[in-house]
Amino acid sequence: MKQTVFFILFFSLSLPFFSQTGSQPIGLHDIVAKKYAPADEWKNIQACADGEHFTALNSEKTAILKYACKTGKVVDTLFHVDKTRETRLSQIDGYQIDIREFRILAWTNQTPIYRRSWEADVYDYDVRRNFLKPLSDTPGKVMIPTFSPDGRMVAFVRNNNIWIKKFDYDTESQITKDGAFGKILNGTTDWVYEEEFVQTNMLSWSADSRFLAFLKSDETDVPTYSFSVFNGDLYPKPYSYKYPKAGQKNSSAACFVFDTENKTTQKMNVPLDADGYIPAIHFTENIDQLMVMTLNRQQNNFNMYVVNPKSAVAKLVLHDKSEYYIDSDWILSIAFSKNNFAYVSEKDGYAHIYLYSMTGVPEKQLTSGRWDVTSLYGYDETTKTVYYQSAEESPLHRSVYKIDGKGVKTKLSSQIGTNQAQFNPNFTYFIHQFSNISTPDFITICDTKGKQLVVLEDNKQIQNDLSKVRFSEKEFFKFKTGNGDELNGWMIKPTAFQSNKKYPVLMIQYNGPNSQEVRDRFKIDWYHYLAEQGYIVACVDGRGTGARGEQFRKCTYQRLGLLESDDQIATAKYLTTLPYIDQNRIAIWGWSYGGFTTLMAMSRGNGIFNAGIAIAPVTDWKFYDSIYAERFMRTPQENFENYQRYAPLSLVDHLQGNLLLVHGTADDNVHIQNTYYYAEKLVDAGKNFEMQIYSNKNHSLLGTATREHLYNRIISFLRKNN
């Protein structure tokens, strides 16, 4: 047997480790009530077409304010609920402004459908006449209202059918008539497209506002999943929706175009496998160029076609292939200009940006090196400059850069930590978000040289609040496993830490493909409270996590759970070598994919974990959705042996340690059947365990009371079992 040797290195990133030593211990209620969560209103900022202004909804949600980028000061009020004619609203949930700023779509009574989709009561506001009225003459909520580029029309979806409202004539017309719940979707996406491609709006207008492209999906043959909703009635009501599990029937998809002049609709002749995907459609600045992106079901072949909306003829302009899978995030982030597009590919082993002509001719590789681009912000054709975020300095850091056509690279962010950017359409300004372990989100407006112009949010109140309480910040470390893999981690010690004392440990982890928990960014979470209760909290990103190149990121392909659990086991072994760790009191915690990894690690760790908490875990990938499971595991039919071998359900007999299972009964993502089947197997194996069920709660287990109960339940479990 080979002896495991660990090479240890502790290091500081931006600031040395220290503890806040206020007079009061940090409170769990304050944490879950988001007292220390940075303000996020800036995320709803919308850039104006002139490149010099932006708009935002005020904190009361009663007014849409227009700001100058250079000064950050309000220069106009475009909408106020108290000043509208014809119709009055108490507040609005969101809005959209046409390019001319003549019309505003404002909505209220927004209700969620799935995680990202929603429907609402939408109103049409004529800015020049100060006149507000319902968008549609037909009562009922609508989805995805989308302005035409000239601002004279808006497309929207009601009951799975597309409608177009023409403002000049105050008329609306129904474009599709075959939409039906659970069958045909026009313009919107089904559950799995929304969840895994992060797409809810599949409408795209041509630049001249003549053509409207849309996705049509048929989910008739997709299997239905149902669960009970316990709403206080004598008999619970069933909730049913279409959910394709791994290897099961998916929706069929096709791209159509409606011609507003000829009032005709035709299908675009885009080559697509019968079980293939269309994750995105996009009209470019050229009126005869509709880009349609396709993926095969295995998601390792990506094609982008340019389609003429009049002839429906498609021509291949980009092909990318992987021995693993193509990351759909890069498909959705393709940056188009009039003559070029920029695309991120991993074909040299790292995620880098490549520039192509609009006909698909490769022009140049814009970035290179043994590091990953982590976000593509856009391409400015005027200056031949691409804007992006990367992990060039370290997988733990993110910085914002630009690089021009001559290869001259400029770093636009100066602070060390996590830097993010949101550019306006003509790349004259960007909103810069910075944080590190010691600094809450600091939001500014900068010019494209990186010069700070305006501070939008400094979150000083959070710093003031934290200065009054006791808690320890994260300290970062690295270690090498016996296989020679260097892994990154962080650790939180109690403020009263004594090096000659032995402490129990809770290992925090997620470890899903391309995820990262070990980052230099600000976050105060429930485990800071746990540390003050006498625990050491540690987190390590194992193989399969992000920002370390394609091989590190995709080495878990077709065998999810094996390497991830190996690395968590290696982490636990490393922790036992530290003099202040109680090697008999190591616990592991995870949610969703992290819950899956928790069960895998407890089943393969030969008793190194004394306890574990698995929240909403996947217990067999055949129970999870097709796009996600098959991206990383292929179908159960193709990879039957590994589906079984690396399923916690198959390893129940090997589970060691005290276990708490947690799940919400209304989880539409990781279905509670995962936990129920696993619990049944535990009973059959004669293993004791604890279970916490949350009625009518979805995958996120949201709500201050629910989260406080959850974390108190976990802490109580740890005190008793670890």
Image: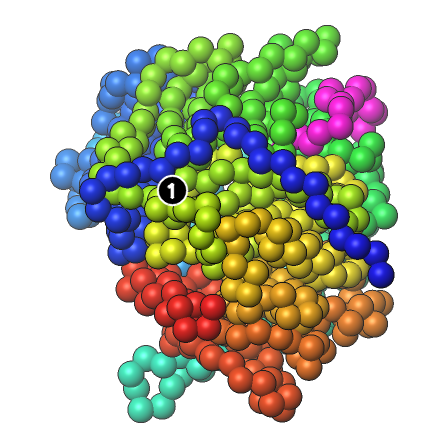
**Colouring scheme, one of rainbow, by chain, secondary structure, one colour:** rainbow
Q: Position of residue 577 (x, y in %)?
A: 62, 51
Quarter occupied by residue 32: bottom left
Q: Is residue 371 magenta?
A: yes
User: In the image, what residue occupies the spot 31% across and 91% down?
Assistant: 234
Q: Position of residue 426 (x, y in %)?
A: 52, 18
**In front here: 655 or 710?**
655
* Part of the protein shown in magenta: 354-374
Quarter occupied by residue 168: top left
Look at the picture and state if 314 lies above or below 70: below
**In front here: 282 or 667?**
667
- Quadrant where the N terminus lies? bottom right
Callout 1: helix, strand or loop? Answer: strand
Q: Is residue 271 visible?
A: yes
Tag 1 residue: 472
Q: Is residue 40 visible?
A: no
Q: Amino acid at mark 1?
A: Ser
